[in-house]
Image: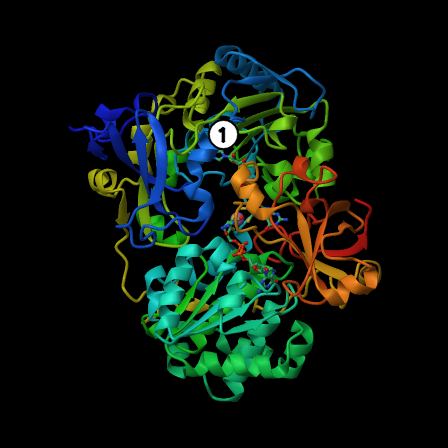
């Protein structure tokens, strides 16, 4: 058989060129890749390599979602891979904990010592070891494959990976039976697009292209977002509601649909369970009440309902921003029911999309990759990654189990991204905690490590990708050999498993084999050659119902969850008046356009576009506080204090401040970032963080 995949170790012209376009005369090759980042777009890449060095990263013009275009960040991917500050050898801590002082050591010395330390802990209780990882790469191989096998075999604590999408995910599963939605391409056919809690231009650029096509064909675009984003600027209408009030707005829209007779009664009768209970709830939400809760006008609420009911096809694009408050899960449940109430699903270009990832169940085999059958007999405890601050500080107890003694971090930067950093920092600083970080760079988290292990970037390893914003499987061929002594995550865990004496044959599986195991039902040769394969899906997924719930109908009243209702924020003037008296401003902290969470913050060309850490504040809030545009301010609450620059203007609505992007703490004016202020409280469903449910005060500070 013709092996079409190059291994990372042997990426070279002769093994990779079946999948490449080779121009041997010039010594230039173009390798098919996939963007690894945590973004709905998962672009197909064309990577140009000249004499073993990547000279260009471009979008694949043939891949329909990518259509040849890349965001500014990923077109700079080579700058990141060849960054002079890449970690190129294993590093061992030599200075005090957290000082970021290391000396290079050999792979063998590092892995031998790490294995010995883990073994000693595991002999007492393997649950004292905790993996901590998220979506630094979304690849099925370099994400949870060999790593999961390793931790399952060890019997380590399981990690509940909630930090991004589990509230909305749980809401979709409750309502539709899966994380399912519209085809990305079909947004071009819509005549109304409601962009709800998403800054598409920044964080879902390839969706925006389809929305613009619809706009050129006459569609109306409405943006629902507390912040006047660059996306809001380009929509016909912007509804700047107060954070965490989306559930009330959805109920208000339902109220209008009901009282005006705009329901699709046939669709509801045939394909929705439990609507009567929802009708009763919605009738309590007239537009005046909704307007008061959301900080909108009653006309705005009624106008949106009229547009939504009277325009066909009508599409909603949610993103995860709107679920990061106490009631985020309930809000997503309510919004997901809207297209069922109007029958919007009947038409191409109608319906909604939050996540498409459930569609990939037909192609993926997670159990084959992750081998949960390696768990030794019992089910280890599960630790929620969103409360890592509290959990690192928790002593052993009957309920909690053993104290966390070792933390193995990969594909994540918890020191920067996890909520309530003062607690996270205190946890990582524990002298008795053994920390290993697999990384490209000395991030805030890597600075805390006892060992830093150099990982390869997407240019240097093989991977297979699914997407949460479209319905294609992609392959990423390695374009170059690993930089320095870097190794793929898979290889690091393979070698660590060997050091631990794990001799099950699955620990010897190569990346090629893992790639085939990941997507067993796909035509792998086609995937490998062309770079991407579209899932076989119905053109109109729910035109005739057929949701993935037990009975095929969308669910209103869900066992254990009840009928969805508005769940107010934990921290707001109404729900916490005493707190709001001291901290009257709501703070949200959405993504910065030129970073990807905390990734790319150290790429100079991108950082210079973002400038420096800042908080946007409306003139009505800045004036009385004596805060001027460009001045340094202290943003604070009972959890912490954060020093940054103020951007006074109307990107922020009155009463709400926006702390953009997840900056590296060490690049902040006082060595902190916005998560100094966020809380570890969890959402109503899905055990997710509530980053955008956060009251603060802002005061002028001396520079
Ligand atoms: N450039 C860039 N792209 C990214 C990312 C990034 O950091 N940078 N992050 C990636 C990741 S990890 C994810 S999860 C995705 C999704 O990323 P999301 O977290 O969905 O981020 P955005 O698309 O910016 O949408 C969030 C929007 O919701 C708004 N918002 C905040 N609170 C509320 C609220 O209560 N209600 C409503 N209606 N809106 C609210 C914010 O102002 C923001 O404009 O994007 C991915 N893409
Ligand atoms: N205040 C606030 N906080 C937030 C958010 C917010 O909106 N506001 N958003 C939240 C969301 S949606 C998310 S998803 C999380 C994201 O949090 P994380 O998943 O931690 O994402 P990143 O900050 O991008 O960090 C990923 C790290 O993985 C590393 N990495 C990338 N590829 C590889 C690889 O192949 N191997 C190894 N070993 N490492 C690799 C990168 O160098 C990077 O340092 O942050 C959350 N935090
Ligand atoms: Mo995310």
- Furthest residue to the left? 1
In the rendered image, the vertical position of residue 21 relative to residue 535, given as above or below:
above
Quarter-wise, where is residue 121 in the image?
Answer: top right
Nearer to me, 28 or 258 = 28
The image quadrant where one finds ligand 2 is top right
- Residue 86, x across and y down, in percent: 51, 26
- Residue 583, x across and y down, in percent: 80, 58
Say which residue appears at 74% left-offset and 63% top-offset: 572
Quadrant in which the C terminus appears: top right
Residue 175 visible in this rendered orientation of the protein: yes
Quarter-wise, where is residue 464 in the image?
Answer: top left
Query: Along the horizontal axis of the image, is 291 left or right of 159?
Result: right
Say which residue appears at 64% left-offset and 27% top-offset: 447
Say which residue appears at 72% left-offset and 28% top-offset: 429
- Packing grade of label 1 (10 A; few <14, some 14-19, many >=20) is some
Residue 394 visible in this rendered orientation of the protein: no
- Residue 383, x across and y down, in percent: 60, 39
- Residue 338, x across and y down, in percent: 47, 73
Query: Along the horizontal axis of the image, is 423 left or right of 176?
Result: right
Q: Is mark 1 within 8 Å of ligand 2?
A: no
Quarter-wise, where is residue 451 in the image?
Answer: top right
Nearer to me, 335 or 532 = 532
Return the residue at label 1: 83
């Amino acid at each position: 058989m013709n092996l079409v995949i190059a291994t990372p170790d042997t990426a070279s012209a002769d093994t990779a060129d079946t999948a490449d376009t080779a121009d041997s005369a010039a010594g230039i090759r173009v390798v098919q890749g996939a963007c690894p980042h945590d973004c709905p777009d998962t672009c197909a890449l064309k990577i140009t390599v000249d004499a073993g060095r990547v000279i260009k990263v471009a979008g694949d013009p043939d891949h329909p979602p990518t259509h040849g275009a890349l965001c500014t960040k990923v077109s700079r991917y080579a700058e990141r891979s060849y960054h002079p500050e890449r970690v190129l050898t294993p590093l061992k801590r030599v200075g005090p904990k957290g000082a970021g002082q290391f000396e290079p050591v050999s792979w063998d010395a590092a892995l031998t010592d790490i294995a010995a330390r883990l073994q000693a802990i595991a002999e007492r209780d393997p649950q004292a070891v905790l993996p901590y990882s998220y979506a630094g790469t979304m690849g099925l191989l370099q994400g949870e494959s060999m790593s999961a096998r390793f931790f399952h075999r060890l019997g380590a604590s399981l990690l509940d990976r909630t930090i991004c999408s589990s509230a909305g995910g749980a809401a979709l599963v409750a309502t539709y039976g899966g994380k399912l939605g519209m085809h990305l391409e079909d947004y071009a056919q819509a005549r109304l697009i409601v962009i709800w809690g998403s800054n598409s231009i920044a964080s879902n650029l390839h969706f925006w292209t389809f929305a613009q096509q619809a706009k050129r064909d006459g569609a109306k675009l409405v943006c629902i977002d507390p912040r006047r984003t660059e996306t809001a600027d380009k929509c016909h209408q912007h509804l700047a509601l107060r954070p965490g009030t989306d559930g009330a707005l959805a109920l208000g829209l339902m109220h209008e649909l009901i009282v005006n007779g705009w329901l699709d009664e046939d669709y509801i009768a045939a394909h929705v369970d439990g609507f009567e209970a929802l009708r009763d709830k919605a009738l309590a939400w007239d537009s005046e009440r909704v307007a008061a809760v959301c900080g909108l006008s009653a006309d705005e609420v009624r106008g949106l309902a009229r547009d939504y009911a009277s325009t066909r096809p009508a599409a909603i694009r949610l993103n995860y921003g709107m679920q990061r408050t106490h009631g985020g899960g309930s809000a997503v449940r309510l919004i997901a029911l809207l297209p069922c109430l109007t029958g919007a699903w009947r038409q191409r270009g109608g319906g909604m999309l939050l996540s498409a990832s459930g569609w990939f169940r037909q192609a993926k085999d997670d159990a084959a990759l992750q081998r949960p059958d390696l768990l030794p007999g019992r089910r280890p405890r599960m630790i929620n990654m969103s409360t890592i601050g509290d959990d690192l500080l928790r002593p052993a107890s009957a309920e909690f189990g053993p104290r966390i003694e070792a933390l193995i971090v990969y594909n994540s930067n918890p020191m920067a991204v996890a909520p309530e950093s003062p607690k996270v920092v205190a946890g990582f600083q524990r002298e008795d905690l053994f920390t290993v970080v697999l990384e490209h760079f000395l991030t805030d988290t890597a600075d805390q490590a006892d060992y830093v292990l150099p990982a390869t970037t997407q240019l240097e390893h093989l991977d297979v990708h699914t997407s949460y914003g479209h319905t294609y499987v992609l392959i990423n061929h390695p374009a170059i050999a690993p930089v320095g002594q870097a190794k793929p995550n898979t290889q690091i865990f393979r070698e660590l498993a060997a050091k631990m004496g794990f001799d099950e044959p699955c620990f010897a599986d190569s990346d090629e084999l893992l790639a085939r195991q990941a997507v067993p039902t796909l035509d792998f040769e086609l995937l490998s050659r062309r770079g991407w394969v579209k899932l076989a899906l119905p053109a109109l997924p729910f035109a005739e119902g057929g949701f993935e719930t037990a009975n095929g109908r969308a669910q209103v009243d869900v066992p254990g969850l009840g009928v969805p209702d508005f769940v107010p924020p934990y921290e707001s003037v109404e729900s916490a008046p005493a707190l709001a008296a001291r901290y009257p401003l709501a703070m949200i902290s959405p993504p910065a356009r030129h970073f990807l969470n905390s990734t790319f913050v150290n790429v100079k060309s991108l950082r210079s576009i973002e400038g420096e850490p800042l908080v946007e504040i409306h003139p009505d809030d800045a004036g009385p506080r004596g805060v001027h545009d460009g001045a340094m301010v202290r943003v604070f609450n009972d959890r912490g204090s954060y020093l940054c620059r103020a951007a006074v203007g109307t990107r922020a609505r009155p009463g709400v401040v926006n702390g953009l992007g997840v900056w590296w703490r060490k690049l902040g004016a006082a060595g902190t970032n916005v998560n100094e202020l966020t809380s570890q409280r969890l959402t109503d469903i899905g055990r997710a963080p509530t980053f955008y449910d956060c009251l603060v005060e802002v005061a002028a500070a001396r520079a």
